[in-house]
Image (spheres, grey):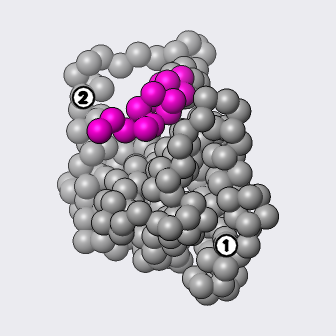
Amino acid sequence: MSNPYSAAVAVRRHLLSSLCRTTMAGLATTTATGKTGASSAAEQNRAENVTHELYDFLFAEEGSLLRDPAFGFSATSLDHAADQLGLSRACCAAIKPAALVHEFNERKLVELGARLADSGPPGTMHEGLCRGIRERLLLLEPYRATWAGALAAIASPEEVAPTLNHVERLTSALLAHAGDVPAVDMTWYTKRMLLGGVLGLAEVQWASNEGSLEEVLAFVATSLDKVGM
C-alpha cells in the first residue's frame, strides 16, 4: 500500500529541502577576502568523519554529557568529546552547538517514529497529536535541564532554514500518526504552522520547568482544541 504522504508531502519536502540547502550555502564559511571558501574533497571527508565521531561519542551512554547542565548542548561538550577521543579541539571548532542540536533532533525523530508505529492508530486526530507530543517530550525528558540552552542555540537567524526543515518533518510525522490525509491546498501549510506553534510553546514551557509534564500536556490539549486540532 502506498504511503498517503508520498505525493503531496514529498514534493513540498523536496522544495523545502532545496530552499534549506540554498540558504545554508549562502551562509557558508567565507575567506578573509569575503569570498566563499571551498574545501578539498579530502578535507571535507575528514571533517565529516570527525563530526560523526564526535556526535557518536556525545550521544552514547544516553547522552550523559548533554544531560549535564555543566555541559549541555554547547561548545564545552564538543571540546570535552574531542579531548576524550584524542582529537585536537581545532577539529571541532567549526561545529556549532546548533549543529549538535539539529543532529540530536534528527536522531530523536527516528526514535519517535518507531514509538508511534508501535503505539497503534489513535481514535481521533486530537488523540493522536496529544500522544505524539507526549512521546516527543518523553524522549526529551532526560535532557530537560539543558533543553532551554538547546532551543537558544537554534534560535539565531542563520539557523532558521534547518530548524524549519526539522519542524516540517516533525509535524508531518505527528500528523501522519494522527491520521491526517495530506491536502493539496493551503491547509497543508496551515496545519503544520499551527501544530508547530503549539509544539514550540509546549517545549519552551516544559524546558522552563513551568509545570509538570502532565500540566504541559494539558496545555497542549487545550491549545490544540483552540486551533481546531
Callout 1 crowding tier (Cα within 10 Å): few <14, some 14–19, many ≥20: some
Q: Which numbered marker is on residue 221?
A: 1
The local secondary structure at tag 1 comes to helix
Dot in front, 1 or 2? 1
Image point 30% across, 71% down: which residue?
A: 62
Image point 63% across, 46% down: which residue?
A: 192
Query: Which is nearer the N-term, disc 1 or disc 2?
Result: 2
The local secondary structure at tag 2 comes to helix
Q: Amino acid at mark 2?
A: Asn
Q: Amino acid at mark 1?
A: Ala
- Quadrant of the image occupied by residue 162: top right
Q: How many marks?
A: 2
- Marks 1 and 2 close (CB-CB < 8 Å): no
Q: Using the image, determine if residue 116 lies above or below residue 134.
A: above
Q: Which residue is mark 2?
A: 45
Region rendered in magenta: 1-15
Q: Using the image, determine if residue 214 lies above or below residue 162.
A: below
- Quadrant of the image occupied by residue 229: bottom right
Q: Residue 186 in magenta?
A: no
Q: Using the image, determine if residue 221 lies above or below residue 77.
A: below
Q: Which numbered marker is on residue 58?
A: none
In the picture, measured across the screen, residue 210 lies left or right of residue 66, that is: right
CA distance separating discs 1 and 2: 45 Å
102 or 1: nearer the viewer: 1
Callout 2 crowding tier (Cα within 10 Å): few <14, some 14–19, many ≥20: few
Whether residue 98 is visible here, answered yes or no, is no
In the picture, measured across the screen, residue 166 lies left or right of residue 195, that is: left
Expressed as whole percent of the image width and height from the top left, the position of residue 211 reads: 67, 85
